[in-house]
Amino acid sequence: EALVHLVIKMKELMPTRRKDTRKSKLALSLIFGAISLFSERAQCFTIAPSLSSIRLLSHERKHSVDYLYSSQKGRRSANNSKRGQGLENGPFDVENESFEQTQLNIQNANAEGKQVPVNLSSDATDQNHSHAHAHQHHKQNSMSKLLSHIIPPDDQKQKLVSSTQEWKKLEKHAEYIEQTHLRDLLQDEARSEELFAEHDGLYLDYSRQRVTLDTMDLLFDLADKQHLKERITAMVTGEKINWTEDRAVLHTALRAERNSDQNEEERIIVDGEDVMDEVWDVLDQIKYFTDAVRSGEIRGFTGKRLRNIISVGIGGSYLGPEFLHECLKTEPEGINKSLGYTLRFLSNVDPVDVERACADLDPEETLIVIVSKTFTTAETMLNARTTRQWLWDFMGDDKEVVRKHMVAASSISSAERVKEFGIDTEKYFFRFWDWVGGRYSVCSAVGCLPISLLYGFDLFEKFLLGARSVDEHFINAPLRQNIPVLMGLLGVWNMSFLGYNARATIPYAEALLKLPAHIQQLDMESNGKKATKHGILIDYPVGEVDFGEPGTNGQHSFFQLLHMGQTVPCEFIGFLQSQHDLCIDGESLSSHDELMANFFAQPDALANGKTADEVRAEGVDEDLIIHRTFEGNRPSLSLLAPLLTAYSCGQLLALYEHRTAVQGFIWDINSFDQWGVELGKKLACDVKDHLLDARTSGSKIKASNPATSRILNYYVENSKQAIGEELWDSNPLTSVTRKTHYDRDFFPPVGHDLKGADGKLT
C-alpha cells in the first residue's frame, strides 16, 4: 500500500520523451529500492494504465540497476554473464521471465487497458530469502518507520483533519476559487452584505477575502467537525488542553469578573484551587502596591520617590506589555496619569540594551520589575543581575537596596528562586500560574505591574474590561457572527487551502507600532508546530509567517511585494477617530482622514489590481505595460474600532489571542506549548561553556562540528582586540554607571508639547 503511494508521488519524475531514461532510472531505483526493504514474501504490486508512463529501463541501461539489486543479500553480482538476462533474485525477476518478455507483457496490457500483477518474488528464491531474513527484517523496520512519517498508516491518517470529508470538500472547493477573481466577487451585492460582523464597536469586513458564501458554509462545517465550540468551552472552563505539559489554558480567567454569590456556578477550579479567587488576590495586591508607589507611600532605599520603572523580561514577558504601553502613552488619560514617571523595557541580552534602559536614570528613583515565569530564563536573569549590580554600584551592596528597588512577577513554583535573588517575597512577589503561557500573559502581573506603576491600576482595569468583552463574545456568539472565529477560519483557509504562507498586520495607527511584533510571537510560537494531539505528523500546511508595520510607513516599505510579488493576505486595522487629530490651515481634510483614505484604498487596490487595458488607456508605452499592471486578487480583511483607548486595546489583544487558538483547534495542534525554543537554549549553554573555557585557559575550542569550532575560535581570537584586553583582567563597576543622569550638562524642560496637565506633575 505504501508502494502505491510512492509510485503516485514519483509520477512527476516520469519522462515526457520516450528516449529520456534518466528520470525513469531514478524513479524505478527509488521504488524498487524501497521494495527490497519490504517483507520478502509480499513483494507484489500492480502497474495500472494510469501509471503507464512508468517504463522499464531499456535492455542496454538495465545493467546499472542490476549492479545495485543483483541479490537480496545486497552483494554485487560477480557474474557479468548474467547481465541482460534479468536481475538475479531481484525486483525484475517475475517468475523467471526474461526482461524482454516482462516489458512486452506490461506494454501490451497497458495498450489494452488492463493491469498486470508483477510478482517480485519467486519460489526459486525462497531459500535465499530465508538466509537474509534477519538482515531484511531490520531494514524493513527502518523503512517502515521512515515511511510512517511520509505516509501515515491508515489508522493514523484517519485521525488527521485532512482525512475528513469536510476537509476534502474544501480542497475541491479551492480549485473552484482559483478560477475566480475578487474583482468580480466584490460586485456581488448579496455576498458583500453577508461578509461582515460587529461586536461592541468592532466592525470586521471580510468581503475582500477569496471566499464565497459556499466557502464559509464549508468552513463552518469543518469547525463543527472539529468540535470548535466544545474546544472553546474546554479552554475557558479549565480543562487541561495543553496536553504536552498537562496544563489548563486560562488566560481568559485573568480578566474575568470577580467571584460573587451570583456567579457561584461559574467558578473555575484547577488542581483544587479556585482560579478567580487567586487572580483577584493578585490584582488587589498589585493595586495596593502600585497606588502606594505612585502616592509616595512606598519609597526607595534612600527615601526618594520611585519615578522610573524598568521592566526586565523577554518574549511574552515584554512584547505584550510594550504593545500596551505604546498605545497608552499617547492616549489622553494615559498622558495625564503617567506625568512624572518613566517606563522602559529591557529585554535583549545585548549590553547595548542595558545601556539604553538605564542611561540618564537616577538609580535611587528607579524600580526594577523582573518578569520571568520560571525565574531561570537566561537572558532575563543576566539582565536582572546587571541591573542589581547597577543599583549596588550607586547605593552600596546592602540587601535592603534589592528589597526596596526590585520586585518580581513570576510563577508560584519560582518563589524560592525569587527569594534567593534577594527580592522580598512577602511584599514584592507578584505571582502568576502555570496555566498562563508567556505570550498570553499580558493581563496577568506580567503586564499589570509595569503598566499600573506608570498609568495607575484604574486605567489597566479598563484594558481588562475590553478583553473581557471579546472573551464573552468569543464564548457566546454564534460561530457565523463570531469575529475571532471568522478570522481564525479565514486564516486556516488562506494557509491550508490557498497556500498563502505569510500574513501581514497593518495597523493604521502609529500607537499600534508594537502590535505586529506581539502578534508575530503570539501566532508563530503558538501554531508553528508539526504534530497533532495524537502524535501524528501533519500532512497539511500550518503556521503562517506573521509580520507587519503601521500604515502608511508599511506602504513605503514592503507594499511593493504585497501588490506585485507573492500573495500575502493582509489585515488592516483602523479607527473612526484619532487619539490626536490635526487639521492644518489650508488643508481640505484632517490628518486622520488622510490616513484613513489610505486604509480604505489599499484593500481595494490589492483586490482589484489594474489591468493592461486600464494601463494602456493612460497612454503608457507598450513596452512598460507589463511592469505597471497589477494582477490583484490578493485577499485582505479590514477591522475598524471607534478609538484607540485602553478598552479597545484589550479588545484587540483578546481578538488575536482567540484567533490564534481557533486556528490551532481546527489544525488539531497544541497552540499553548513552545518546545521549539528549547533546543537553541540548550546549545547556547554548551557554547557558553566553550567560551568560558577558551577565555580562562586560552585553549582552542573543539565544538560538535568543524564549522562551529572554526567560527567560535575566530570570535574568541578577535573579540579581545575589539573591546580591550583589560576587560578580561579586571572587574570594573557596571559600565552603565558611567552614563547616568549625573553626567548630563543640562536637564530637559519640565513642559512638553503634549499639554497634559500643563506639562507639570500635579
Image (cartoon, helix red, strand yellow):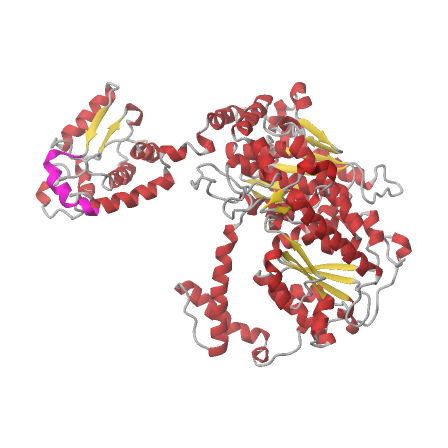
Q: Name the spot of residue 372 as percent of width and height, x first.
A: 62, 58
- How many circles with numbers are drawn on the protein? 0
Residue at position x 78%, y 56% in the image: 288
- Residue 729 at x, y percent in the picture: 57, 81
* Relative depth, front residue between 61 and 177: 177
Compared across the picture, whether 42 is left or right of 252 comes to: left
Residue nearer the viewer, 291 or 222:
291
> For residue 126: magenta?
yes
Classify residue 406 as left or right of residue 33.
right
Is residue 524 in view from this perspective?
yes
Q: Please name the residue shown 55% across and 46% down the image.
A: 247
Quadrant location of residue 234? top right
- Occupied quadrant, residue 618: top right
Q: Position of residue 758 (x, y in %)?
A: 91, 55
Query: Residue at coordinates 65% horizontally, 46% vertically from top-left?
Result: 275
Residue 714 seen by the camera: no
Q: Is residue 585 magenta?
A: no
Spot occupied by residue 37 in the image (x, y as percentages of width and height): 24, 42
| Image quadrant in which you'd find residue 494 | top right
Q: Is residue 418 above or below residue 554?
A: below
Q: Left of 754 or right of it: where is 627? A: left
> Where's the C terminus, which quadrant?
bottom right
User: Looking at the figure, which quarter contains the N terminus?
Assistant: top left
Q: Main secondary structure of the magenta part?
A: helix
Q: Give the range drawn in magenta.
A: 121-135
